[in-house]
Amino acid sequence: MSVEIFYDDDADLSIIQGRKVAVIGYGSQGHAHALSLRDSGVDVRIGLPEGSKSRAKAEDEGLRVLSPAEASKEADLIMVLAPDTKQRAIYTEDIEPNLNAGDALFFGHGFNIRYDLIKPPANVDVAMVAPKGPGHLVRRQFVDGKGVPCLIAIEQDPSGNAQAIALAYAAAIGGARAGVIKTTFKEETETDLFGEQSVLCGGASALVQTGFEVLTEAGYAPEIAYFEVLHELKLIVDLMYEGGIARMRYSISDTAEYGDLTRGPRVITPEVKENMKAILAEIQDGTFAREWVAEDEADRPNFRKLQEAGEQHPIEETGRKLRGLMSWVDRPITETA
Ligand SMILES: NC(=O)C1=CN([C@@H]2O[C@H](COP(=O)(O)OP(=O)(O)OC[C@H]3O[C@@H](n4cnc5c(N)ncnc54)[C@H](OP(=O)(O)O)[C@@H]3O)[C@@H](O)[C@H]2O)C=CC1
Ligand SMILES: CC[C@](O)(C(C)=O)C(=O)O
Ligand SMILES: [Mg+2]
Ligand SMILES: [Mg+2]
C-alpha cells in the first residue's frame, strides 16, 4: 500500500489537550470539530464575527464565542473552518496580527494554501486535518463512537511536531477511529475539488436530475421516478460503501447487473471521461479557483441563479412530499448529532 494510515494507537491525545484551540467558523465542519474537541477534553473557543448567525448555536452548546481576532490571540492552535472564499480576509485581518512564533495554523481543506491565497510566516506550523465527509456526519459518527476518515497534511513544520499535533487533532474529532491518511495540501485540494465536482456532488446531482427528467418526460409518475433515481441510490451506494462495486453487483439481480455492465458505459461515455479530464485540468491550473474567488467577490450572481434553479427543479417538490411520509428519512440538515 502506498499511503500511510494512522489509527488511535498512533496518536497522542495529550498533545492536543495541551493546546489552546480556536475554531474559526461554526458551520458544518466548525460545529463538528469544536464539539468533538471539547468532548475529547480539549480547551476550545470559537471565533465568529459580531452578528454571525452561528453565534447563538455555539453559545447554546455552552461554547465560549469570541471575535475571530480575540479567539486567534488567545489560542496557540487556530483551525480555520470559515468558507474557503472568506478565509483570506479573515487571515489578513484577524489571524495574522495575532500569530506568534510556535503557533499552529490548521485548515480543514487546502484551498487557500494550495492557491497561495494565504501565506503564513515561516515560524508557524501549517497543517491540515480534512475529514472526508460532511460535518454533520463527522459529528454524528463521533457521538456514535465511530469516526469519519481524515486526511492530514503538513505544509510547514518549524516545531518538528506538526504531524503529531495533526494526528492528535484528528483523533480528538474521531478520525483516527476510522483511519487517518497522510497527504499533501496539493493532493487533498485537487482531489477534493475533483471528487465533489465530477462525481460526489456535481456528477451525482446531474445524473439524478437527468434520470428523473427522462422518466417524468416519458410520462411516468414523479413519485416512482423519485424512488428509482434518488431514494434507491442511497441503498445502492451503501452496498458500494460496504464492499465496493463488486459487493453491490453481487447483491442486485442479474438483470440489473447485466444492465449495469452494458448500459452504464453508454451513460458515462468516453466523452464524459474527457469532460472530467478537462474539469481536473481547470482545478490543476487554478482556473476553477480564480473563477470561484471572482464569483464570490462579485457577490455570487451566477451561484445564486444556479442555486435557485436547482431548488426549483421538480424533483425537490416530489422529494419533499415523499420524505414527509418517511419520518425516519427527513433529518433536518441543521441537526448536529
Ligand atoms: N462542509 C463540509 O462538510 C466540509 C467542509 N470542508 C472545509 O471546511 C471549511 C468550512 O466549510 P463549511 O463547514 O462547509 O462552512 P459553512 O459554510 O458550513 O460554515 C462557515 C462558518 O464560518 C462562519 N463565518 C463566515 N464568515 C466568517 C468570518 N468572517 N469569520 C469567522 N467565521 C465566519 C459562518 O458563520 P455564519 O453563520 O454567520 O455564516 C459559519 O459558522 C472549508 O474550508 C471547507 O472546504 C472540508 C470538508 C468537508
Ligand atoms: C463532498 C463535498 C466536500 O468536499 C466534503 C463534504 O467533503 C465539501 O467540500 O463539502
Ligand atoms: Mg471533501
Ligand atoms: Mg470539498
Image: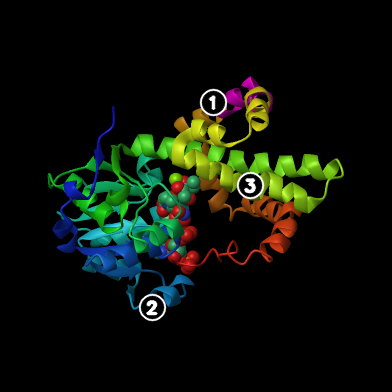
Q: Which quarter of the rendered picture does the N terminus lie within?
A: top left
Left or right: 32 in relation to 248: left
Residue 232 marker: 3
Tell me the residue at 22%/50% (across/down).
8
| Magenta residues, start to end | 265-277
In the image, residue 322 sits, relative to residue 240, either above or below, namely below
Question: Which amino acid type is marked by label 2?
Answer: Glu
Dominant SS in magenta: helix
Q: What is the CA distance from the residue labelled 3 to the residue labelled 2?
A: 38 Å
Dividing the picture into quadrants, the one containing residue 140 is: bottom left
Tell me the residue at 40%/56% (across/down).
138
SS at mark 2 in the image = helix
In the rendered image, residue 213 lying in the magenta stretch gets the answer no
Snapshot colouring: rainbow
**Residue closest to the eye, 168 or 177:** 177
The answer to whether residue 83 of the structure is visible from this angle is no
Of callouts 1 and 2, the N-terminal one: 2
Position of residue 287 measured from the top left corner of the image (x, y, whole percent)? 51, 34
Question: Which amino acid type is marked by label 1?
Answer: Lys
Contact between marks 3 and 2 (CB within 8 A): the answer is no
Alpha-carbon neighbours of circle 3 within 10 Å: few (<14), some, or many (≥20)?
A: few
Q: What is the CA distance from the residue labelled 1 to the residue labelled 3?
A: 29 Å
**Residue closest to the eye, 56 or 135:** 135
Left or right: 110 in relation to 19: right
Left or right: 305 in relation to 64: right
Question: Which amino acid type is marked by label 3?
Answer: Glu
The answer to whether residue 229 of the structure is visible from this angle is yes
